[in-house]
Image (spheres, coloured by chain):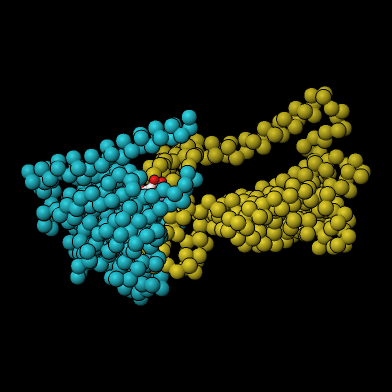
Chain colours: A cyan, B yellow
Amino acid sequence: MSNGNERIVFDHVSKVFDTENGPLQVVDDVSFGVSDGEFVALVGPSGCGKTTMLNMVAGFMHPSDGTVTLDGEPIVGPSADRGMMFQDYGVFPWLSVEDNIAFGLKLKANRVAAERRRQIVDHYVELMGLGDFRKAFPKTLSGGMRQRLALARAYAVEPDFLLMDEPFGALDAQTRTSMQDLLLGVMGEVKKTVMLITHSVEEALYLASKILVISARPSRIRRVIDVPFGYPRTEALRDSSEFSELRGEVREMVMREYAAQEDQARSNRRKQVGQAQ
Amino acid sequence: MSSSSSARSAPVASPTTGNSPGGPPRKRLAGSLYRLAMLLGPWILVIALWYGLRYSGLFKPNLIPTPVAVAERFWQLLVDGNLLLHAYMSTQRVFLGVILGTACAVPVGFLLGWYRGLRRFMDPLINFFRALPPIALIPLVIVYFGIGETAKVVILFYAAFFASVIVMYEGISQISPLYIRVARTLGATDYEIFLRVIIPLAVPHSLTALRVALGVAWATLVASELVAAQQGLGAVIQEASAYFQLDTIYMGIICIGFIALVMDIALRALSQRLLSWQERHH
Ligand SMILES: Nc1ncnc2c1ncn2[C@@H]1O[C@H](COP(=O)(O)OP(=O)(O)OP(=O)(O)O)[C@@H](O)[C@H]1O
Ligand SMILES: [Mg+2]
């Protein structure tokens, strides 16, 4: 399975949660690798275990079976080399925009001199278009601005990996598109290895170099799609016929999994009713 | 800490600040008159009710002193009756009780909020002690601490501690784990998380705890000064009640209320400065 330049490797990973209704298998024997510089999108029905997989890479959760390794070493906990962007942003409300960006740079793990820190903060304030708000507290920012702030903060400590859990899910369509372009722009400047969770096939295709279609729970890798478009990408790509063709194909594939999830939920309910009687 | 609803709420001006300083002078005047009315209105209302009650015939006139009589008594005691000394003694006791009480309540409340097992274990005990009225403890306090200053401060400490410890641990236990996770992915150690995430998030709860403690301590003051106090507003009230000097009793109560109010306003102003980052929903 593992080839030379794969940095993150899932090797026969399973995850079982203990719940009130007994054990719940969420991830089932999943194996895949993420190579250096790859942009991997995870697409799959709600509740199939995508966040769980990302949490195992971040180091917040551990497999019940199998291993998740980074450069051959099992992942034991979170660290500054794996930046994470959370669905509800997680910008620190008690810090101003610039102090949010500087937060990681003041930690022992990635401390830099004050002068250098200011330069980095200036750079990202500029890059993310937050110039008018650098002294402002997050309470005055819009959703898109908070998202940009979270991205700036994650980028500032120069992680090798960026883990994104539905980062643009809460944004309106316009802001979402511009955030996608911003992300691609920033990636063009400093390349990162990315794992991104999304429910949008369009978003996955536009951003990623590889798409993993995840099955209904317990999750398995149903399909691996190599996205044939090179970088840099621009909005024109969305209008191309290849793009819309591929989008149709992938969408169908994903729809099947969403439908399977529905069926499964229904049959589970039936089972429960049967047990009750 | 919902972050979505708030983005648009910030710039909405409240009606009192609606008149910008640069507006036309007529409007500015109307604005300050409005503010003055909002400031004095409630007090004028209370005094009017007071007069109303006095002359309503519901009570014997000698049972309700007029506001003027109370004000006269205030002036008299201020000039030659050591009123300032009494107020100072009471304030000092409240201060000591509150400072010591919150100084203990903040770390204890923090630990209880942070460690769920500890909280479950201690919760019944804390609620037990909190439910005891401090006045019921006076005999015990006298036995163990005598009748000096210590005894009075101990009672205020007790009241302040149990009121504020609950505020503190309820607040701490609701801190969102999201911020801690974010800090971890940025490379923070446990110590750094404590210093840079938990402490800033604990400040608002500490300030609320302080405010609650201050309120409770003033409310307990008279009880604490039941312990052989010669000085203090509570002592003034008790002595006056022995001689049935209703105007002095009223005056003492009003003094306590006003000092408590001023302290609360000061504390609120301080929290607003320290906590300007917080979103306010109203
Ligand atoms: N700590 C936990 N304890 C018990 N069950 C959990 C835990 N975390 C997740 N689960 C369960 O595991 C399943 C998968 O959760 P996960 O959050 O990984 O889904 P997801 O694919 O990210 O879904 P969505 O697209 O809705 O975010 C869900 O059924 C969830 O209830
Ligand atoms: Mg999820």
Q: Residue A213, percent across and down?
A: 23, 49
Instruction: Tally the numbered discs.
Output: 0
Vertical arrangement, residue B16 with respect to residue B126, above or below = above
Which is more toward the observer, A17 or A205?
A17
Rendered residue at 35%/45% (across/down)? A47
Residue A115 visible? The answer is yes
Residue A156 visible? The answer is no
Which is more toward the observer, B47 or A95?
A95
Task: Name, please, the residue furthest toward the top.
Answer: B57
Vertical arrangement, residue B48 with respect to residue B150, above or below = above
Task: Name, please, the residue furthest toward the left.
Answer: A241
Q: State left or right for residue B116 relative to residue A213.
A: right
Q: Quadrant of residue B100?
A: bottom right
Q: Residue A192, percent across and down?
A: 23, 64
Which is more toward the observer, B73 or B207?
B207
Rendered residue at 48%/29% (across/down)? A277
Q: State left or right for residue B205 relative to residue A74.
A: right
Rendered residue at 56%/58% (across/down)? B114
Rendered residue at 48%/67% (across/down)? B190
Q: Residue A243, percent across and down?
A: 11, 46
Task: Name, please, the residue furthest toward the bottom.
Answer: A113
Which is more toward the observer, A115 or A266?
A266
Q: Residue B175, percent across and down?
A: 51, 54
